[in-house]
């Protein structure tokens, strides 16, 4: 069905791609502090690939991508080492996390659900 297809140009996916390419550009700066950076970047790239390849099956695309994108929990804080001054880097990471949190709250209508 055409109605079940995923919009691969959504903001969340494009933000993941932006973070991935930024981490690739700053790889030399971060790799000294991140022992498993090469494998985490490969898994993160594979998560975006899974999202694209299975975009015709939304459940598989989202779940497979999110399962592999769990490395994002470790990769996002490494952005602190890629930006100078350190306070700006910390602010950017906190703003990113806050934006993802707000997107989840408003997209899933978590504030409107009643506890029963």
Image (cartoon, helix red, strand yellow):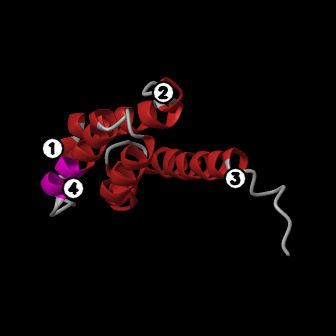
Q: Position of residue 111 (x, y in %)?
A: 81, 57
Q: CA distance from mark 3 to mark 2?
A: 20 Å
Q: Secondary structure at mark 2?
A: loop
Confirm or deny contact between disc 2 and disc 1 (CB under 8 A): no
Q: CA distance from mark 2 to mark 4?
A: 26 Å
The disc, 4 or 1, on the residue closer to the chain's N-terminal end is 1
Foreground: disc 3 or disc 4: 3
Mark 3 and mark 4 lie on one chain; the one further toward the N terminus is 4
Q: Element type at marker 1?
A: helix
Q: Mark 2: few, some, or many residues within 10 Å (few <14, many ≥20)?
A: few
The residue closer to the viewer here, 18 or 65, is 65
Mark 3 / mark 1, whichever is N-terminal = 1
Of mark 2 and mark 4, the one earlier in the sequence is 2
> Which residues make up the magenta segment?
37-43
Give the overall secondary structure of the magenta segment: helix
- CA gap between label 4 and label 1 equals 14 Å
Query: Comparing marks 4 and 1, which lies closer to the viewer?
Result: 4
Q: Dot 3: within a 10 Å radius of its alpha carbon, few (fewer than 14), some, or many (20 or more) residues?
A: few
Height in image: 58 above or below 112?
A: above
Residue 70 part of the magenta-drawn span: no
Mark toward the viewer: 2 or 4: 2
For mark 3, what is the residue? Answer: 105
Q: CA distance from mark 3 to mark 1?
A: 35 Å
Classify mark 4: helix, strand or loop. helix
């Amino acid at each position: 069905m055409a109605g079940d297809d995923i919009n691969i140009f959504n903001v969340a996916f494009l933000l993941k791609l932006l973070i991935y390419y930024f981490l690739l550009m700053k790889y030399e700066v971060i790799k000294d502090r991140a022992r498993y950076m090469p494998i985490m970047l490969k898994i993160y790239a594979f998560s975006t690939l899974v999202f694209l390849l299975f975009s015709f099956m939304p459940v598989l695309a989202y779940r497979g991508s999110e399962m592999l994108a769990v490395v994002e929990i470790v990769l996002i804080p490494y952005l602190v080492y890629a930006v100078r001054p350190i306070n700006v880097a910390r602010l950017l990471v906190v703003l990113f996390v806050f934006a993802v949190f707000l997107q989840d709250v408003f997209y899933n209508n978590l504030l409107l659900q009643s506890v029963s």
